[in-house]
Amino acid sequence: MKKALYVAATAIAMAVGVGVYLQSGATAAPQSKFVLLDGSQKTTTDLKGKVTLVNFWATSCVTCVGEMPKVIATYDKYKDKGYDTLAVAMSYDPPSYVVNFAETRKLPFKVAIDNTGAVAKAWGDVQLTPTTYLVNKRGEIVKRYVGEPDFAELHQLIEKLLAEA
């Protein structure tokens, strides 16, 4: 009887573990090359080791412009704790508009221009902005937001991910 209970308890524990793993839905971030405003490049591999917010946005997107102060505040709050932000402007956004936005708003994080649309395509064929991904230290996407995130919830998730080894 004890052996049967032990086997049942082990099976339940394993099932719960598998369920938690499957629910986490962490998948490797797609391999991408980001061309930054200063002409330098960053790759998906460069994201590893930090919790990173990858935000697809456009200067013509009212929600994107509206959420940007919260994206900046989030970056400022966690940047010294192993957190980073990468804002990816959509291919249809004129580069001069993106540069002007980044300069006038003094964006404190890296901004990339996806001039060919290849990055948006690789990241799940992003078409709606803002679309935001939270990537853990292992380079895995743990959350995708379409539209403005609930920033209180986002901050809780960032803190949890920063606490992970």
Image (cartoon, helix red, strand yellow):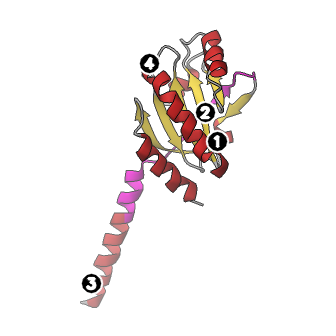
Disc number at residue 4? 3
Spatial CA span between label 3 and label 4: 60 Å
Is residue 53 at least partly visible in the picture? Answer: no
> Which residue position is annotated with label 2?
86
Amino acid under disc 2: Leu
Q: Which quadrant holds residue 117?
A: top right
In the image, 158: left or right of 17? right
Residue 35 shown in magenta: yes
**Part of the protein shown in magenta:** 17-39
> Mark 3 or mark 2, which is nearer to you?
2
In the image, 95: left or right of 38? left
Q: Which quadrant holds residue 116?
A: top right
> Which residue position is annotated with label 1?
47
In the image, 88: left or right of 36? left
Tell me the element at label 3.
helix
Residue ID at (27%, 83%): 5
